[in-house]
Amino acid sequence: MTRDQKLRDDRLVFYANDITRLDSEIDTFLELSKARCVLLVDRDGHLVTRRGESVKSHEDTISALIAGSFAATKEMARLMGENEFAILFHQGQRDSLQLQLIGERTLMAALFDGRTNLGMVRFYAQETAERIEAILVEIRAEDRGTGLTEEFGAGAASALDDIL
Amino acid sequence: MVQINFAQKTVNVKIVYYGPGMSGKTTNLEIVHQRAPDKNCGELTSISTDGDRTLFFDYMPLNLGTVAGMRTLFQLYTVPGQVYYNSTRKLVLQGVDGVIFVADSSAAMLDQNIEALRNLEENLNEYGKSMATLPHVIQWNKRDLPDAMPTDELARHMNHHGAPTFEAVANTGQGVFPTLKALAASVLRGIMQETSGGARPSGGTESPAPAAPRQPARQPAVHAAPQAPARQPARQAEAPAPTPSRVRQVAAQPVPQEVVSTAAVRQQAPAVQQPSATGLMQQPQPTASARPQTRQRARQQGTAVRRARQQTAAIATKKGGASTGIFIAVAASIGAAIAWAAMNYLA
């Protein structure tokens, strides 16, 4: 596999239509499961999309922590002879969080409270994960360029000069 | 890996500070957090031990603002530097777009610097990456130390790919921003080179050729008016102003003592447990020090040992007595026979 091909395989480029489809699946899940919100995070810690009630001000940090947490448990699973621990569950006093692996590189974090229960969330999350995985497989199958222009490069360099 | 989201209008880039333990990786991030404009800095999240040693990673998002219609976010991570935490270092490197290697300029740390660099290459290889192709810069930190080595000598040992190098005294802030700026620029150049240099779709246009169901959506918002930054990452109001705050700390068990020399490190590195065919980890045989016993159990065992020893001694004594008797009897018989022969044949 050439380096360019590998880069394209690894790169995540989402267009509006992709996010619309993902959001639609997540909205259905939220309606059925009565969860509070869902974050879709890739394994590198980047937030793909978020739906439901807001954890807005900490989104980036939470995404990074979710990815780190999952990466740690994946390594534990490997050392224990398991392929993976596909689901993590964190129980809080008010809210609980279920992390579900979708495919090999995406995580769905579902935050829920007393309005629903773990069984409902887990049941619908499984179905939703399969549908989301199908969408992500389609996205990755396409050969997409970055779509960024020279203007972006120059602008980013200028922003770096201003900040740093 | 760079994530480009035209729907959310975001570009996310992951940068990792790497280096041996106590080289100044977390200090670099703290300085950036402290001195970069508030509107561009997110929270600094640290997962560290009680002794403020990084346990998993430190994380801070650096927002460049909206560039060509895209909210550009650099996600800055540091890794734990101690040899013990290699597995977690490897996890943090996943999807990295650029590395800042923070080296300790002290002569006493040369071996650890070299080992950390080797470890970085090894961990990158596991993701199909390499220092030869990954954007990276090297920071010679702690230049204020009396035994700081000359930078050309450090470069001879560590800069195998001609990466840009920067001198720094991170705890005063010196050299921190130039290092980060250089790497960020390098990563951005890499992204733009990839855009212009062959990752273009077959249509040949600068923007990706829209497929039928996606026509309006696939155009990135290049020509849109610059937007106000979409989100202002919140800073913890209670963070003390003069020093960078660790927003969250997860207390953990105290870390083991850091090993200084490479040779000692290799001896003391915990063995990787390979799963057996049944999927269960092979448990190491416990050493005496790993299984402390209760006092009562020890006393009982000591008594049993003493009894066993006594019994063995008794058996040994009995066996010894019987053997001697047989020997004497045989000797006496032979003696008597000789005497009889002498009397009858020699007289």
Image (spheres, rainbow, N blue to C red):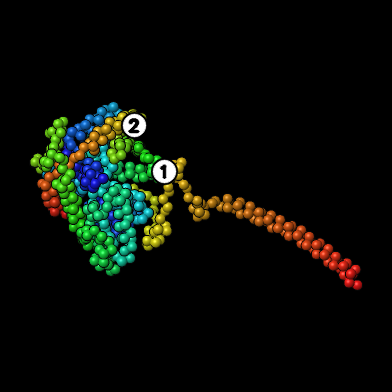
- Within-10-Å neighbours for mark 1: few <14, some 14–19, many 20+: some
The N terminus of chain B appears in which quarter of the rendering?
top left
Name which quarter of the figure residue B168 lies in. Answer: bottom left
Figure check: A39 above or below B331: above
Instruction: Report the residue at 33% width, 59% height from top.
Output: B115
Name which quarter of the figure residue B220 lies in. Answer: top left
Figure check: B164 above or below B129: below
Q: Chain of mark 2?
A: A
Instruction: Report the residue at 25% width, 63% height from top.
Output: B155
Mark with earlier residue (2, 1): 1
| Residue B282: percent from left, percent from top | 46, 47
Figure check: B108 above or below B72: below
Q: Is residue B71 visible?
A: no
Which of A93 and B73 lies nearest the eye of the viewer?
Answer: B73
| Residue A75: percent from left, percent from top | 36, 45
Instruction: Report the residue at 61% width, 54% height from top.
Output: B302
Q: Chain of mark 1?
A: A
Residue A122 got which mark? Answer: 2
Label 2: which secondary element? helix
Marks counted in the figure total 2
Which of B46 and B86 lies nearest the eye of the viewer?
Answer: B86
Which residue appears farthest toward the front when viewing the image? B345
- Residue pointed to by mark 1: A80
